[in-house]
Amino acid sequence: MPADAPRPLRVAVVGGGPGGLYAAVLLKRLDPAREVTVYERNAPDDTFGFGVVLSDETLGGIEHADPRVYRALAEEFVRWDAVDVVHRGQTLTSQGHGFAALGRRRLLAVLQARCAELGVRLRFRTPAPPAAELAAGHDLVIAADGAGSRTREAHAGVFGPRVTPHRCRYIWLAADFAFDAFRFDIAETEHGVMQLHGYPFAADASTVIVEMREEVWFAAGFDESSTEESVAHCAKVFSEALRGRPLTVGPSSAWTAFRTVVNERWSHGNTVLLGDAAHTAHFSIGSGTKLAVEDALALAACVQEQPALPEALAAYEAERRPVVASTQRAAAASLRWFEELAGYLDQPPRQFAFNLLTRSRRVTHGNLRLRDERFTAAVERDFGCPPGTPPMFTPFRLRELTLRNRVVVSPMDMYSATDGLPGDFHLVHLGARALGGAGLVMTEMVCVSPEGRITPGCTGLWNPAQTAAWQRITDFVHRQSPGTAIGVQLGHAGRKGSTRLMWEGIDQPLPDGNWPLVAASPLPYRPGVSQVPYPLHRAALTDLREQFAAAARRAARAGFDLLELHAAHGYLLSGFLSPLTNRRTDAYGGDLAGRLRFPLEVFDAVRQAWPAERPMTVRISATDWAAGGTTAEDAVAVARAFAAHGADAVDVSTGQVVPDERPEFGRSYQTPYADRIRNALGVPVIAVGAISSWDDVNSLLLAGRADLCAVARPHLYDPQWTLHAAAEQGYDGPGACWPAPYRAGSRTPPTGRTD
């Protein structure tokens, strides 16, 4: 070796699972001079679980990186493409899903053999040396030692792990026969709901995972039973699915609660996290081994391609973190779906199956239709779709108002009014979106008083001039876009008022001309920045209630078809509902009943002022995304109370109540809250929150997670979003009517030649 040649890397891998072994294989294969050692404290064939599911995408990566490993695995694969959902004695099958699985022990054996062939040192039944010692003696340390990683915990102050336990107990088992499909079986027992996840991994064997809410697990007495006794109980519960066969317990089989692992950083010096040590994703989307193998592929490639180790570890994390975050969001949605499974059991069988299949939001109406058109068409028929009509273009009725489709232009503050008066901007903004085909177009929050504005640019309904200005807009919508409904959202900013226009400094107080703020309690929105609001006394509460009612009467005269009361996002009424913002000790504070009192008084006054034949909805924040705030149970109770007082639908949003919130952003991230309320109460709901495609809308509706979908930013990008959604789906029916002057544009324009 020349004197100036870099010394080959010395690599220590902690953990002999699939991710650690595959990382060792790839690093050694890419540079045979590297010294690679794998430490595994267990025996070679000890394993957690029985079968492993790998996607075609992961298999393609394996084939490209090491064809020999791929060929060895391919000989073992069991492939199938069906999913069976068993619900109340009925089996519904969806085809076209494409799975590949093999035994976990066989996967380990293939990787161990490839390691030995390449010269990787395998040290089984050997705990790894302490993390600091390994880091001092090696160029690279790969912590692939699982969700409970000791290496990660040794440097927890740097990695910043967050480990979140969840509400179900589960156990990995096996059956001595092969299921015909990926099987989900639901059992309603005297103790509660239990579910079985099963799939074949060999010609004569299947993985079986039995899962249930923790309270069901306790009620069934599993906390006092041996593992064998509880497993025998499960075999009886699912005897039909298991064909009367017993369940096999492995050496690592034990009841446990799933834990989601997230880390702020994946590397520290020359130590890097891989697989479950860095991140976990719920088994219901089959991603643990997949993610670990893909981590190994990326890490090996980055080490090979980058000039030095720090750059390689940074590139690895930059490449993998977005992919993992997306997978974890999908896994979290799937996990929560199974946690809330009992709430879906009364759905019609095909809708229940569709709901289960689309639970992670990765499988949608569109790709499920491609996989199994017959199954999807049956779900559509059950939903009530006329022939050739996508779900989003089916009508929906609220009181005497029939919406021609399920799309709502969500309320979006424009901050473009003068003295609360909507002008030409609002006419063009709302008129354009009405012409764009949505079933319902909502105004921004229209304030009930000058002091109720968020900013000086907010619209209002506190005087006759504003009523006339709004009537100009509703007249335009009704005249130029017949069949489109227009709704008004009434609200009061509360402690979030008297601020600058959004683009001048969101939530920042006005530099001058401020007006006094009122709220449930004297708590500023941003301590040290925002004004301190005055707590409302009894007389002021009465005045505010009348301001809402008077605004409702003006809204009726202005010609609005629907009225929504804004009780979300930390504005006045929301401030009464959240325990984080309501610290009152009188009748309008304390427990949830007290916190609901004033919002319900306002709702009743508005409902009485609003014409009986016209629908009224309410928007709520179903979570504050902050500790100590509104719980999921609170949100259901709030929705129940408003529905009991006459709300025709609940518009379910989240957050914006306190500035230190930590939302779990992502695709359709707020829709699970709408889903929960709809299925718990049977009340119609409007879902909102990063719903960005017509495929999402169709999926949410068919799964029974929402009745209407409110879409915001896509309508800013494309005012004709709804009509374009119809055109892209080949639909030209009564649910999507092109205005006569626009009909020539109802087809996608031809593009230029590209040859």
Image (cartoon, helix red, strand yellow):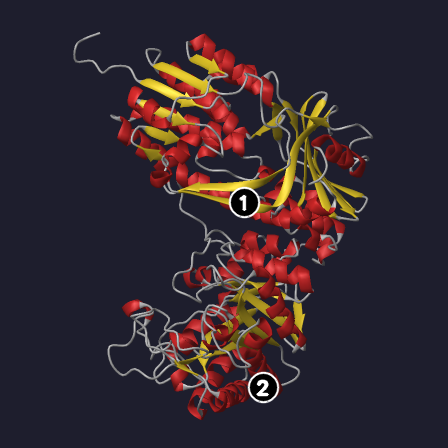
Spot occupied by residue 599 in the image (x, y as percentages of width and height): 55, 78
Quadrant where the N terminus is found in the figure: top left
* 114, 579: nearer the viewer: 579
Q: Residues within 10 Å of mark 1 (few under 14, many from 20)?
A: few
Of the residues shown, which amino acid type is indicated by label 2? Ala
* Towards the viewer: 431 or 495: 495
- In the image as oriented, which residue stretches furthest toward the left? 3
Q: CA distance from mark 1 to mark 2?
A: 44 Å
Tell me if 323 is positioned left or right of 281 in this view: left
Q: Residue at x 47, y 74 (%)?
A: 583
Q: Does the rendering let one see residue 66?
A: yes
Q: Position of residue 238 (x, y in %)?
A: 78, 37
Q: Secondary structure at mark 2?
A: helix
What residue is shown at x 49% (from left), y 51% (from top)?
Answer: 667
Q: List the residue tagged with mark 2.
A: 605
Q: Nearer the viewer, residue 142 or 315?
A: 142
> Which residue is label 1 attached to?
165
